[in-house]
Image (cartoon, rainbow, N blue to C red):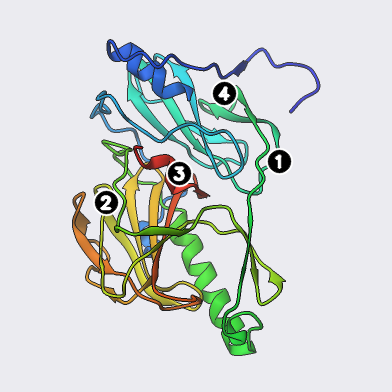
Amino acid sequence: MPESPSPFLLRSTPASDGLADRRGFLAALAAGALLPSAVHAAPRQPSSTPSPTAPGVWPRALQVPGGVARLALGPANRRPAVRTAAGLPVLVVGDPIEWTAVVGIPLAASPGEAEVQVGTAGEARRIAYAIAPKRYAEQRLTVAPKTVDLSAADQARYERERDHQAGVMATFSDPVPAELAMAVPVPGRRSSSFGLRRVFNGQARNPHSGMDIAAATGTPVRAPLPGTVIDTGDYFFNGGTVWLDHGGGLLSMYCHLSRIDAKVGDRLATGDAFCAVGATGRVTGPHLHWGVMLNRTMVDPALFIEA
């Protein structure tokens, strides 16, 4: 951030929870391996299809590392183009009456002020928002030593898979989602929550980037929102894995699967079964690892579940 305030700098303001009419609802909203040919570095032209205005659209706003910010953009004839400070495209929902940016906040983000840029280079205005601190719990796990101290062959495999999935995570497609509230993909007890600091066999690793749901091997996993299958695979750490693209940079991933019943390109409706719970990859028992991504940032799936 520059030392002197920019004339284009705006600050986010909380929105009312009133849903009496469309403007009131949208104001409330504001408060609070893909094949290489299908990877988009920037969003396509916005769809002319208006976003829904039904009450109950999520995610809930929680402006902490790993959370979600909802920023009011005001009215405009066309869907505004919004990017993070790092230049990543941001999901924008709403209609010409009121647009809202739905921003994923990285787990590695430092508390303090952050911003998005609205508009094109040279004419962009900046909207600042605050990130509050959050301390996540620690979880210690014992797993097979070979999944912590990798052999040369396993390390090379992991690096290939990491580069491949970076392409998957860069997906930004049109149209934007017609809804944002997600159904839980599998019934079961939440066995591990988002953001836990993971310690495997005494060695600290990256924080937990999804939600673990305990369920028996073979339990069907169902799509939480309409989406397109953009990647399937058997990966070193994640085991059997499926990625879904819900549009506008909103993706979801499903790991440790025992069975995959879908292929790249399949279009799923909410509730469609497309894979099954398992215990593949680096795990201590059968469960579903469910991840949700916004603007290439893993965020807390719990924020997308209507309480």
Earlier-in-chain disc, 3 versus 2: 3
Q: Which residue is mark 3?
A: 42
Residue 290 point in image, percent of width and height: 41, 58
Position above or below: 114 against 244: above
How many angstroms separate mark 1 from mark 2 (CA)? 32 Å
Nearest to viewer (mark 2 / mark 4): 2
Q: Amino acid at mark 2?
A: Gly
Write the residue at 60% across / 77% down.
142
Earlier-in-chain disc, 3 versus 4: 3
Q: Secondary structure at mark 4?
A: loop
Are the residues at dot 2 and dot 4 in contact (C-beta closer than 8 Å)?
A: no
Q: Which residue is mark 2?
A: 227
Front in this rendered view, residue 84 or 124: 84
Earlier-in-chain disc, 1 versus 2: 1
Front in this rendered view, residue 113 or 210: 210
Q: Secondary structure at mark 2?
A: strand
Earlier-in-chain disc, 2 versus 4: 4
Q: Locate the N terminus by quadrant.
A: top right
Q: Answer whether residue 97 is visible to the viewer in this image.
A: no
How many angstroms separate mark 1 from mark 4 (CA)? 24 Å
Q: Residues within 10 Å of mark 2 (few under 14, many from 20)?
A: many
Locate residue 130 relative to residue 242 in the image: left or right. right
How many angstroms separate mark 2 from mark 4 (CA)? 31 Å
Residue 151 point in image, percent of width and height: 63, 88
Mark identifier at residue 124:
4
Nearest to viewer (mark 3 / mark 2): 2
Are the residues at dot 1 and dot 2 in contact (C-beta closer than 8 Å)?
A: no
Write the residue at 27% across / 47% down.
225
Earlier-in-chain disc, 1 versus 3: 3
Q: Amino acid at mark 1?
A: Ser
Write the residue at 54% across / 40% down.
67
